[in-house]
Image (spheres, helix red, strand yellow):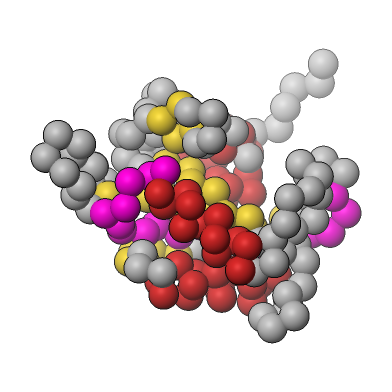
């Protein structure tokens, strides 16, 4: 993946974004269609779409009751990651996303998962995403678009992380 070069200004960076939806949208309809519309919105907002995974139906984690539609997208951008997060939050808001319960139902959720070997650990943004390596709803789509990506802080590729997440857990 290409990297941002802070010393000489912004260069194109490949950024991996996870998408999720488990509520209908008035204009776009079912969660699967919300995901497709969100990818289009990202392109309209200046992000170059490099790859899009299939949409996966997944069970919710936490108290949410509705199944999710999840996908992953690789985008190319010259926008610094904190500003890219702002772009994604505006897209979520335009789709009707409002603050609420941590594990609650949502029309659209967009998360920056990673950007090559870039690491950010601020209050507002953590890259790579701190929990993605154990979440099948992120890894299953992500392996389709970036199977060989080795996130900073991990010795394994996305494909290997997914394999580990698929293994049955030993009884306690």
Judged from this view, the residue extending furthest toward the top is 172
Q: Picture coordinates of residue 115 (x, y %)? A: 36, 43
Stretch of the chain drawn in magenta:
64-82
Is 20 left, or right, of 146 in this rendering?
Answer: right
The total of numbered circles placed on residues is: 0
| Residue 78 picture location, percent across and down | 26, 54
Viewer-closest of 67 and 161: 67
| Res 125 seen here | yes
Res. 61 visible in picture: no
**What residue occupies the far left of the structure in this picture?**
8
Residue drawn at x 48%, y 52% is 86
Quadrant location of residue 9?
top left
Q: Nearer the viewer, residue 140 or 102?
A: 102
On whether residue 68 falls in the magenta region, the answer is yes
Rendered location of residue 10, percent (x, y): 20, 47
> What is the quadrant of the C terminus in the image?
top right
**For this view, does 99 lie left or right of residue 136?**
right
Residue 149 against residue 69 in the figure, above or below: above
- In this rendering, position of residue 99 left or right of residue 48: right
Whole-percent x, y for residue 159 in the image: 45, 42
**Who's the residue at 75% across and 22% down the image?**
170
Relative depth, front residue between 142 and 92: 92
Residue 142's place in the image compared with 31, above or below, is: above
What's the residue at 31%, 58% (across, down)? 76
At horizontal 36% and vertical 64% (from top left) the residue drawn is 47
134 displayed left or right of 39: right
| Residue 121 lies in the magenta-colored region | no
């Amino acid at each position: 993946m290409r990297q941002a070069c802070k010393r000489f200004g912004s260069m194109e960076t490949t950024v991996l974004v996870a998408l999720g939806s488990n509520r209908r949208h008035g204009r776009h309809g079912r969660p699967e269609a919300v995901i497709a519309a969100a990818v289009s919105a990202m392109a309209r907002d200046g992000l170059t779409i490099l790859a899009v995974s299939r949409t996966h139906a997944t069970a919710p984690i936490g108290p949410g009751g509705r199944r999710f539609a999840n996908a992953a997208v690789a985008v190319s951008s010259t926008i610094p990651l904190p500003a890219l997060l702002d772009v994604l939050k505006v897209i979520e808001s335009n789709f009707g996303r409002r603050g609420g319960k941590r594990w609650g139902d949502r029309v659209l959720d967009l998360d920056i998962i990673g950007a090559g070997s870039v690491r950010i650990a601020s209050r507002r943004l953590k890259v790579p995403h701190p929990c993605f390596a154990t979440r099948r709803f992120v890894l299953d789509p992500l392996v389709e678009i970036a199977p060989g990506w080795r996130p900073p802080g991990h010795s394994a590729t996305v494909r290997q992380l997914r394999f580990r997440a698929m293994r049955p857990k030993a009884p306690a």
